[in-house]
Amino acid sequence: MARRTFLGTAAGLALAATGVVGRVRGPQARRPQSDLLVINMLGGIRNPNRRGSRGPFGGAPADGPLTLDDRALSDALASGTAATNTTIGYVAGPQDPFEYSVADVARWNRIIRAHPEALLKVWAASDIERAERVKARSGSSRASRTRR
């Protein structure tokens, strides 16, 4: 008998002996998905259908053009996400860490200013709550948290 099979069988028998296996809960009421506050902590907004797209993060020089295309932004808004946490600034590579970080902060500020109807810089939790209220009224998300 394989080790995993043995361990699985032993665990099942132990649970069966306690009676836990026999206790099945009835169907639980689920909250409507529209009531959830969704925050994307993986960060980043990008268009997966655009060849070489990494969005406005990673890879491209910090002083490069705005790379947040309409598809990436519309997909993010349609997802129902209230906020996205995006790490900006130097993480690794040959660039000067300070210069790259300053340029990347300025770049994100330009991106947010270019899309005021869709993006909001988050300074406090109340900004996320405000973005969620706007999303509930308009059906789209607005918050984008950036961290250095």
Image: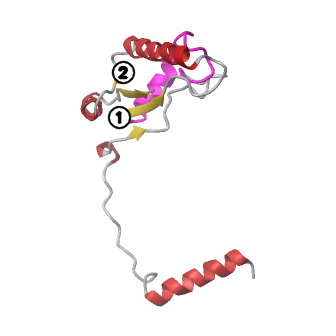
Mark toward the start of the polypeptide (2 vs 1): 1
The amino acid beneath tag 1 is Ala
Q: Position of residue 45 (x, y in %)?
A: 50, 27
In the image, residue 114 sits, relative to residue 89, either above or below, namely above
Q: Is residue 104 in view? A: yes
Image quadrant assignment for residue 92: top right
Q: How many marks?
A: 2
Q: Position of residue 55 (x, y in %)?
A: 55, 23
Give 31 or 84, whichever is nearer the viewer: 84
User: Residue 82's mark?
Assistant: 1
At a point 35% along the width and 34% down the height, the residue shown is 82
Protein image colouring: secondary structure
Q: Give the side of residue 65 with respect to residue 137, left or right.
A: right
Asked if residue 66 is among those painted magenta in the image, a careful observer would answer: yes
Q: For the view shown, which residue lies furthest in the bottom direction?
A: 17
Q: Which residues are magenta?
A: 56-82
The amino acid beneath tag 2 is Ala
User: How far separated are the C-alphas under marks 2 and 1?
Assistant: 11 Å
The residue that mark 2 highlights is: 118
Q: Main secondary structure of the magenta part?
A: loop
At a point 51% along the width and 19% down the height, the residue shown is 101
Give 139 or 110, whichever is nearer the viewer: 110
Q: Quadrant of the C terminus?
A: top left
